[in-house]
Amino acid sequence: MSTNQGPLALESRVIIVGTCKMTIEKNQKRLEIVYKPLNSLIVYVKNARTHSTDQVNAITASIKQYGWTNPVLIDEKGEVIAGHGRLLAAEQLNAKEVPTITLVGLTETEKKAYRLADNKLPLNAGWDQELLTLELGDLLADNFDLSLTGFSSEEIDQMLNVDFLPGNENDQGKLDHLDTKLCPHCGGVL
């Protein structure tokens, strides 16, 4: 057992993955969010993740709605490890500063590997389609702008089985002709 005390105390372990040996002791110190000037950060020129205009616009809208909820990860030199899309959104917002977390003690190889892992690992997750549909239905019932969820309108329509959305008061009568979808848990109409 480690002699470290407090909530961040970790047992010193070695993890061997293939021929890569890493200790869990990296970044044991308390993570600190520091706002840094946008122009002081160094973009990693070999960043393999691409960011479409639509995606950057969605990130920008998310930051406008919720604020900065996910800092940019940088190394000790200020080079970006994760958060290139957020930087592009910050530029769109004309932000002068962005929240950052400095990851210390990573080798260049570990930084490269983490850049890939940070982008790939979330893609390996799935969705519970029933719960996702319920959550979107709840947001729709609350008149929340579903575009802020990151799903396209086509994806949302498909999940909610929406064939028609009234455009004005004259279209309201057509709502009687909709196919409704029932909640599998409570029987309510979605």
Image (spheres, rainbow, N blue to C red):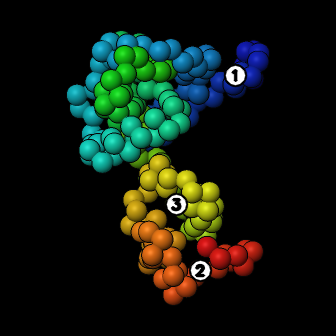
Report the disc number at residue 181: 2
Q: Position of residue 65 (x, y in %)?
A: 50, 38
Q: Secondary structure at mark 1?
A: loop
Which residue position is annotated with label 3? 126
Q: Amino acid at mark 3?
A: Gly
The residue positioned farthest toward the bottom in the image shown:
177
Q: Amino acid at mark 1?
A: Leu
Query: Residue drawn 51% across and 82% down?
Result: 173
Query: Residue drawn 46% across and 40% down?
Result: 62
Residue 3 falls in image quadrant: top right
Report the disc number at residue 8: 1
The residue positioned farthest toward the left in the image shown:
45
Quick one: 129 or 81, which is closer to the camera?
Answer: 129
Say left or right for 87 vs 18. Answer: left
Say left or right for 185 vs 162. Answer: right
Mark in front: 2 vs 3 = 2
Q: Earlier in the sequence, mark 1 or mark 3?
A: 1
Say left or right for 84 vs 15. Answer: left
The answer to whether residue 178 shows anywhere in this view is: no
Q: Is residue 5 above or below residue 150?
A: above
Mark 3 crowdedness (10 Å alpha carbons): few <14, some 14-19, many ≥20: few
Mark in front: 1 vs 2 = 2
Report the disc number at residue 120: none
Q: Amino acid at mark 2?
A: Lys
Q: Is residue 76 above or below residue 150?
A: above
Gap in Å between the C-alphas at discs 2 and 3? 22 Å
Q: Is residue 92 above or below residue 18?
A: above
Gap in Å between the C-alphas at discs 1 and 2? 47 Å
The answer to whether residue 144 shows anywhere in this view is: yes
Q: Secondary structure at mark 2?
A: loop
Residue 42 falls in image quadrant: top left
